[in-house]
Image (cartoon, rainbow, N blue to C red):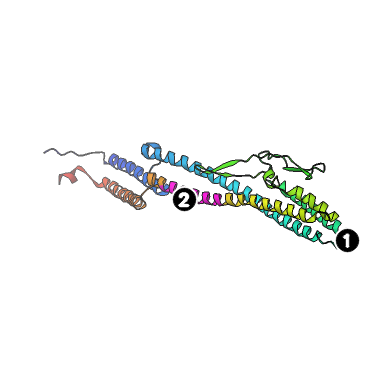
Amino acid sequence: MTIRFNPDLYSDVVAGLNNNNVQQSTAFQELSTGRRVQQPSDDPSATADVINIHWQSAQTDQYAQNVNNLQGLLQTADSTMSSVISSLNQAISLGVQSGDSTLSPTNRATIATQVQNIGKQILTLANTSFQGTYIFAGTKSGQPAYVANPASPNGVTYQGNSNTNQVEVAPGQTVTMNTPGSQLFTNPSGDVFAALTNLATAAATGNGVPAAVDQLKTAFDTVNAQRTQYGTSLNQLQTAQTFLATNKLGLSTQENSAIGIDLAQAASDVQKALTQRSAILAAGGKIQNVSLLDYLK
């Protein structure tokens, strides 16, 4: 019988330690990152899946950013329209007061001035901007929507246009981001500025007050009806936010399924590697006491 004896046991120990170091490094890296795939070559198929998931996730992030930006603009617009409606209510009340035939010329002049001031307030509101964009100027949003123009019958000139912008907030879902001032404030069905101008004149003279008040009420109804668009758009954004959050969570789950680790298995691998290392080191410590005679006994 032939007995083979490896005279270089230390090289076996070193090789075992090197192999164990690789196992430990892999196990610890997986445990610390939570991923079993550290580079594409570890699992090309899973890597391809993750690349697609990351692309979808980036798209979702962009949609979420669109929602956040649009939400701020629409909330500003809706708040502005709330102030406009409050001002119009005040003007209607003043108009009703001016219908009192016992008012003195001074009282009428005071009411007329108050109505004119409300017109100025609404002009300022109609020129509201958000992050440098005039939100009621249509798509010509780089300049104020309105300027005062005494020569105009309604006292203003609209500098915007009637166009709107659509923003995609989810795949296949768009939201209108603006309602032009020509649709809100100078709508032919109810021109706010014309109604206020006529009411100020009627209040000052006492002539045609009921008709002027009715005209302003019509303008009020028109504005109020148009304002509902903002509520609708904000509700759409809320729905989109919920969808995007759910989609983001789903993509994260898909990524974890593709390259994530089994936590219990990873912990077991770490412990196994540590145990093997201890065994190798223990064996290495005994080499100096081993001789050929030990194998011949």
- Choose mark 2 or mark 1, whichever is in front: 1
**Mark 2 or mark 1, which has the lower sequence index?**
1
Q: How many marks?
A: 2
The amino acid at mark 1 is Ser
Task: Give the residue displayed 82% in from the left and 57% down from the top.
Answer: 111
The magenta segment: 235-253
Q: Is residue 10 above or below residue 226?
A: above
- Which residue in the structure is indicated by mark 2? 246
Q: Quadrant of the N terminus?
A: top left
The quarter holding residue 145 reads top right
Task: Give the residue displayed 43% in from the left and 48% down from the top.
Answer: 250
Predominant SS of the magenta segment: helix
Instruction: Find residue 236 and report its horizontal and vertical position in percent.
Output: 55, 49
Left or right of 133: which side holds 47? left
Q: Residues within 10 Å of mark 1 (few under 14, many from 20)?
A: few
Task: Give the residue displayed 37% in from the left and 40% down from the top.
Answer: 46
- Which residue in the structure is indicated by mark 1? 104
